[in-house]
Amino acid sequence: MKKIVIWALRILLAFGVITVVLAIWKREEITRLLAVNSLFAEEKIVGNFSNMNGAFLWREMDRGPGPVTPIPEGTELELPAAVQDWVEARNVTSLMVLKDGAAVFEDYFLGTGAEDRRISWSVAKSFLSALFGIVVAEGAIDDLDAMVTDFVPRLAGSAYDGVSIRNVLQMTSGVTFNEDYLDFYSDINRMGRVLALGTAMDGFAASLSERDRPAGEQWEYTSIDTHVLAMVLRAATGTDLSELMEEKLIQPMGLQADPYFITDGEGVAFALGGLNMTTRDYARLGLMFAQDGQLGGRQIVPADWVSESTAPSAPTVPGQISYGYQWWIPVSATEGEFMARGIYGQYIYINRPAGVVIATTAADRNFRQDGVAEQNIAVFRAIVNAL
């Protein structure tokens, strides 16, 4: 009996040692996984969204040695009471309004500040679209109706086999992808765990094997489509996405701070939602698109791409929100009214005829409730009407 007890204790001790060794070896992965599980917790979400590089692998981009593109001060806007109520109700963390290129309102809430580099979530998709237009204009990609597998053979045999570049730009790939953030086993949350554990996004995309419908037939919001666009860009240019965006978009824009991307374990940028910037720098993208791709006296994004990418070209349901090439067009939009949009209340809203750009960040845990998205657009339009 005594020998049995001794052997049992030895086994327990060995198991304990192995557990400690594994915990040390996988400490970073475990830390990131725990961070993902508490990322949106009510008491942590605001701070987390300003400090994503504390929880994930990340890669900084150099804003370059050039001057910061100025945003002059304009006549100060007094927010309508309804907008002030919206700021509180939606857990808005920053709000900046430009009128004819000048700042007429800028403020920060819930303990955030102008230097915070806030997570963009899917606003990053519109940055990728801008970069895509530059690469197309330079000739590295000469046909939007080419198949993605022409550039990324690894996707042959996956759900992306037979899908065109235009399909993924418009999110009409038809690829089966569960975007439910509240379902632990959804594809979007499985993808989040890929990031947390430091494994490969390319492999995750290539592992998808099912389609709900033929490519090009119907629009369905599919975040992984944007990663496939990034794979195409990397293949077409032979350049890492962070380096490509740094050279072609970030440095020419004259940002005020170095932005950064969350990355996977191979250093590949989380292109569909991992870009982090200051609110003023988000506003600079909006100003550039309001000015047909020009910023700081330079034509950075081709004007025809600005027009094409922000037009409602995807086959969405009539009477509902429309989509272009990774840009949103609100219901009943006037010509030149479009926006970048991310989960939890991130927006860059552009109303070109009114000369208005609105950049806002938030930590709105109720962003999916019925009517919230429509309320956000109504608030942006109320700001336009107040100017």
Image (cartoon, helix red, strand yellow):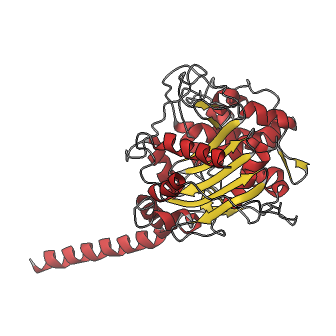
Number of numbered discs: 0
| Quadrant in the picture for residue 118 | bottom right
Front residue (pair 123, 153):
123
Relative to residue 325, is residue 344 drawn left or right? Answer: left
Could you tell me residue 293's position as x and y percent?
A: 82, 43
Q: Quadrant of residue 119?
A: bottom right
Residue 229: x, y in percent?
Answer: 67, 38
Above or below: residue 167 compared with residue 243:
above
Please provide percent x and percent y for residue 172: 59, 27
Can you say which quadrant of the picture contains the N terminus? bottom left
Residue reaching furthest to the right: 297
Q: Is residue 373 left or right of residue 325?
A: left
Which is more toward the observer, 297 or 129? 297
Residue at 65% from the left image edge and 37% from the top image edge? 326
Residue at the left extreme, as displayed = 1
Whether residue 264 appears in this view of the structure is no
Residue drawn at (65%, 45%) of the image: 384
In the image, residue 261 above or below residue 24: above
Q: Position of residue 360 (x, y in %)?
A: 60, 55
- Can you see residue 20? yes
* 169 over 120 or under it: above or below: above
Instruction: Identify the residue shown where x is 82% and y is 62%.
Output: 70
Q: Is residue 282 left or right of residue 143?
A: left
Residue displayed at 85% across by 38% down: 302
